[in-house]
Image: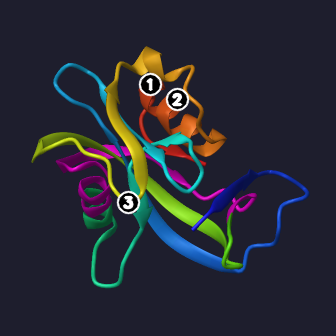
């Protein structure tokens, strides 16, 4: 399903759903971070997605990371919470989602790096190597917040 991100865009469609979601900044022992290039918008992103009934928000981040990248992780902290009502995702099925997202900090504990149905590519990057990658502003904010190491961000 195709997706278009809008952030503080007056031409954005009005949200018709609100979905809790989680993402993860996964950092390995070499200080590299895990990113995926998404199939729905072609952009680089942190692993993450919507929370399912019966799971915690932390479990959501762990599950989504494994599903999308093949890497099992352990949550070690929180990067921030992201709830900008001006940030919506418009899907080709008519859903326009306002997301309530918590971005976690995590470390890899196993698995094998691989792409999935939701990703064209999955790779580890030195933080400075992410500067030139194509990504939506909301993902860039999460990475910048982690890199700034100022503690949890609330946006």
Residue that label 3 marks: 117
Crowd band around label 2 with a 10 angstrom C-alpha radius: few (<14), some (14–19), many (20+): some
Q: Is residue 141 above or below residue 58?
A: above
* SS label for mark 1: helix
Q: How many angstroms separate mark 1 from mark 3 (CA)?
A: 29 Å
Coordinates of residue 110 in the picture (x, y in percent) = 9, 45
Circles 2, 1 touching at the beta carbon (< 8 Å): yes
Q: Which residues lie in the magenta part?
A: 63-89
Residue that label 2 marks: 144
Name the residue at the right extreme: 10
Q: How many angstroms separate mark 2 from mark 1 (CA)?
A: 5 Å
Name the residue at the bottom extreme: 53
Residues 119 and 82: in front is 119
Q: Is 67 within the magenta?
A: yes
Q: Residue at x 44, y 56 (%)?
A: 102
Coordinates of residue 26 in the picture (x, y in percent) = 29, 39
Q: Where is the N terminus found, in terms of image quarters?
A: bottom right
* SS label for mark 2: helix
Compared across the picture, whether 16 is left or right of 26 comes to right
Residue that label 1 marks: 147
Compared across the picture, whether 113 is left or right of 79 comes to left
Q: Is 145 within the magenta?
A: no
Coordinates of residue 30 in the picture (x, y in percent) = 20, 19
Which label lies toward us, 2 or 3? 3
Name the residue at the top extreme: 128
Circles 1, 3 touching at the beta carbon (< 8 Å): no
Q: Which mark identifies residue 121? A: none
Q: Is residue 127 above or below residue 108?
A: above
């Amino acid at each position: 399903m195709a997706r278009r991100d809008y952030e503080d865009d007056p031409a954005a469609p009005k949200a018709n759903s609100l979905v809790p979601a989680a993402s993860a900044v996964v950092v390995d022992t070499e200080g590299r971070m895990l990113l995926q290039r998404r199939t729905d918008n072609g952009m680089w992103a942190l692993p993450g997605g919507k929370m399912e009934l019966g799971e915690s928000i932390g479990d959501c981040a762990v599950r989504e990371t494994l599903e999308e990248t093949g890497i099992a992780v352990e949550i070690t902290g929180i990067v921030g919470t992201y709830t900008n009502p001006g940030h919506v995702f418009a899907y080709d099925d008519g859903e326009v989602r306002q997301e309530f997202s918590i971005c976690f900090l995590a470390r890899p504990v196993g698995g094998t790096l691989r792409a999935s149905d939701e990703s064209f590519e999955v790779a580890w990057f030195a933080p400075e190597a992410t500067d030139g990658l194509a990504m939506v502003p909301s993902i860039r904010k999460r990475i910048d917040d982690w890199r700034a190491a100022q503690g949890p961000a609330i946006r």
